[in-house]
Image (cartoon, rainbow, N blue to C red):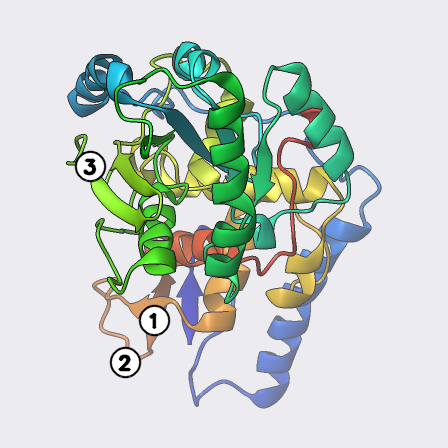
Amino acid sequence: MDIRYGYDTGIRNNPGHASGNFESKRLQFYLAIMSRFIDKTFKLRDKFTLPKSSSLQWFPGHMKKGLDQIQSALRNIDAVIEVHDARIPFSGRNTQLRHVIHIRPHILILNKCDLADLSKKQQILEKIKSEGVNNVQFTSCNDRYITRHVKNDIVPMLLKDIDSRGRFRTDIMNQYNILVIGVPNVGKSTLLNKLMQTYTTKKKCAPVGAMPGVTRSIMNKVRVNFDPEMFVVDTPGILHPHIPNTENGMRLALCDCIPNHLVGKDQIVDYLLFWLNKHENFSYVDRYELTGPTDNVVDFMVAAALKHRFVVPYNDGSKSTEKKYKVNFDRTASFIIKEFQHGHFGKVMLDDDCL
């Protein structure tokens, strides 16, 4: 079998080859790879750069429309729930929405905490508090006890904050309208569904998808509780029109807050490899059966492809009957990104340098 991915393995699936010659070539191949890791000049990158062809800016029309709708809806809103990814508690939080947060009672939900390294949780809370946010809850909407957490912690904290500040809408004192905001794909609609399941018999009221941007417009308010009467308004995920730097943008992309095709799956995988190496997280070595750490994204992806057989046959035009394969890089990149998003490289705190 000949697997091509940028350089020739030198290995063929040809019965005519003598076994000794085959073993010799295979040994030479592995020695060539191992020499890269033994070489004292081998060193990991200390900075990640993104090709100009990749884009980290994503502010489609529905986001601008969503901002305008939020402004119009504010006069009928009693409180705001902001949902964000616990792995990036600082990156990507939309500064344009801070005026909304500060004029209404507000709670920050850091979702997907089951995937986050919270060993510095107190430092995270202190920094968030310094930014003017006092009410913070860590959640995982996949937790079997999420409805209990919603009922016993999140909703009481929110109602207490509303009542302590005095109601903006004095005409309806026994009814609460809650606005849910945040960047794309952090679990806003999922949280809304969990609120619905906590207090009603309905299982789902908002569409949930694996791609950022599923909710495209402000939906009608949905009743999630009867005593007291509580209505929740879902909004589209809204990013800041200008992402400040590459690191910030790549972290958003890695957490699936920016569509993969805008940045490039291979670039997202390369950033993941860079981040893992920078934090000495070499779990990928055993996971993909590498001989040691690598800073080459092609080698990284090839190892994953060979481990999981993400290869496709190809014809080079020759008359040889030998089977030849090449790596399916697109499928491999999607697989590695999903591996990260499911926590297979361990719990991470991508914003650790912000502390």
Task: Kindly indicate whether the residue at mark 2 contacts the one at mark 3 (C-beta within 8 angstroms).
Answer: no
Q: Amino acid at mark 3?
A: Lys
Query: Of the residues tagged 3 and 2, which is closer to the observer?
Result: 3
Name the residue rendered at 76%, 30% in the picture: 123
At label 2, counting other C-alpha atoms closer than 10 Å, the crowd grade (few under 14, some 14-19, many 20 or more) is few
For residue 103, above or below residue 290: above
Task: Please tell me how many numbered marks the rendered image carries.
Answer: 3
- Residue 179 image label: none
- Give the labeled residue for mark 1: 324
At label 3, counting other C-alpha atoms closer than 10 Å, the crowd grade (few under 14, some 14-19, many 20 or more) is some
Q: Amino acid at mark 1?
A: Lys
- The residues tagged by marks 1 and 3 sit, at their Cα atoms, a distance apart of 57 Å
Q: Residue 179, can we see it?
A: yes
Q: In which quarter of the view is residue 2 placed?
A: bottom left
- Name the spot of residue 43 as percent of width and height, x first: 75, 36
Is residue 186 rendered to the left or right of residue 345?
left
- The residues tagged by marks 1 and 2 sit, at their Cα atoms, a distance apart of 9 Å
Image quadrant holding the C terminus, namely top right
Q: Secondary structure at mark 3?
A: loop
Name the residue rendered at 59%, 55% in the picture: 114
Q: Which residue occupies the foreground of this view, 169 or 303?
A: 169
Q: Secondary structure at mark 1?
A: strand
Is residue 297 rendered to the left or right of residue 346?
left
Q: Which residue occupies the foreground of this view, 288 or 160?
A: 160
Task: Kindly indicate whether the residue at mark 3 contacts the one at mark 1 (C-beta within 8 angstroms).
Answer: no
- Give the labeled residue for mark 2: 321
- The residues tagged by marks 3 and 2 sit, at their Cα atoms, a distance apart of 64 Å
- Give the labeled residue for mark 3: 221
Q: Amino acid at mark 2?
A: Thr
